[in-house]
Amino acid sequence: MQISNGNWHFKSTVGGEFAETGIQGKGSLDCVNKWIHLAVTQLGENVTLYLNGTVAGQTKNLMPPFRIGNTTNNWLGRSQFYIRPYDRPYFRGLIDGFKIYEGALNQKQINELM
């Protein structure tokens, strides 16, 4: 998940910064001094982004997870890309939990987890 210029999106890549695929969230992400719940599901080629249990974006053909393979550059709250040496943007906040499920959850299941 990335926030830039008031826009927020979820991205993935196996080919570097210029080979990213992603999904854009609707509207601005107001997360200053408040907890929010973000979820991303992928069922086949359909990808859905949820904000606080509500659909916030949808797309098709995001990179399938099986293409990721074995990797070493996997982070939460840190970008793997940077503009200048040692200028790696970090998430300034708290992450309360992170879960990966086998299979895509539906909207009802996501709301039950919040």
Image: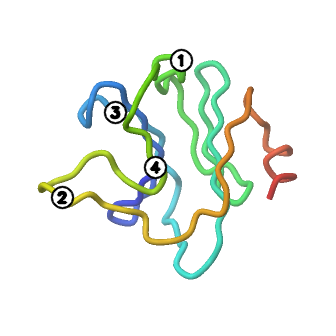
Return the mark for residue 32.
none
Where does label 2 land, which residue? 86
Q: Nearer the viewer, mark 3 or mark 2?
A: 2
Distance between the alpha carbons at the discs numbered 3 and 1: 15 Å
Where does label 1 land, which residue? 66
Where does label 4 land, which residue? 9
Kindly identify the amino acid type of the residue bearing the numbered disc 3. Glu
Q: Helix or strand or loop: what does disc 3 sit on?
A: loop
On the picture, is 71 further left or further right than 53? left
Q: Helix or strand or loop: what does disc 2 sit on?
A: loop
User: Picture coordinates of residue 88 (x, y %)?
Assistant: 26, 57
User: Picture coordinates of residue 108 (x, y %)?
Assistant: 85, 45
Kindly identify the amino acid type of the residue bearing the numbered disc 4. His
Question: Which of pointers 4 and 1 lies earlier in the amino acid sequence?
Answer: 4
Kindly identify the amino acid type of the residue bearing the numbered disc 1. Phe
Distance between the alpha carbons at the discs numbered 3 and 4: 11 Å
